[in-house]
Image (cartoon, rainbow, N blue to C red):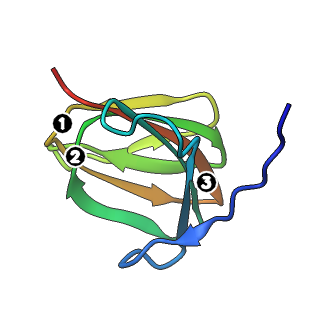
Amino acid sequence: MRIERPALNPLDGAAGVSMTMLAPGLDTEQVRVDIAVLKPGSSLPKHPAGRDQAFYVVAGTGQVAGDDDVPTDVGPGDLVTWEAREQHTTWAMTTLTAVIVQRRGS
């Protein structure tokens, strides 16, 4: 067994957002797993998903939007998915922690 405490790193261009990649030894050509922590009032600005993406809210509340720019409330236990190249945005109302899983699209 191995226990690690990955460091959260500020995300360039997104004040109040920190991320860390989990299991960096995985084949990132196939899958990538990140943890994101967004401080209240911060956001991941609108951007295209680089790969098919699942965004699982572990703690906190916020809003997400896809190509339609319509904000939808999210909270613990919610799973949001975006397809590769789909534009999307995330906003934090409270400190929001999410697991982001990205996989190569088919």
Which quarter shows the C terminus?
A: top left
Asked which quadrant contains residue 84, the reply is top left
Mark pair 1, 3: CA separation:
23 Å
Amino acid carrying label 1: it is Ala
- Residue at the location (57% across, 38% down)? 57
- Residue at the location (49% across, 35% down)? 26
User: Which mark sits nearer the N-terminus, 1 or 3?
Assistant: 1
Measuring from the top left, give residue 68's x and y in whole percent.
15, 43
Amino acid carrying label 3: it is Leu
Q: Tag 3, which secondary structure?
A: strand
Q: Which residue is mark 2?
A: 50
Q: Which residue is mark 3?
A: 96
Mark pair 1, 2: CA separation:
5 Å
Measuring from the top left, give residue 1's x and y in whole percent.
86, 30
- Nearer to us in this view, 73 or 28: 28
Which one is closest to the eye, mark 2 or mark 3? 2
User: Which mark sits nearer the N-terminus, 2 or 3?
Assistant: 2
- Nearer to us in this view, 81 or 63: 81
Mark pair 2, 3: CA separation:
22 Å
Which one is closest to the eye, mark 1 or mark 3? 1
User: Which mark sits nearer the N-terminus, 1 or 2?
Assistant: 2
Q: Pointers 1 and 2 in contact (CB under 8 A)?
A: yes
Q: From this viewpoint, is residue 72 visible?
A: yes
Amino acid carrying label 2: it is Gly
Of all residues shown, which one is farthest toward the top? Answer: 106
Measuring from the top left, give residue 8's x and y in whole percent.
63, 65
Answer few, some or many: residues within 10 Å of disc 1's Cα (few below 14, many 20 plus, some between 14 and 19): some
Q: Which residue is mark 1?
A: 84
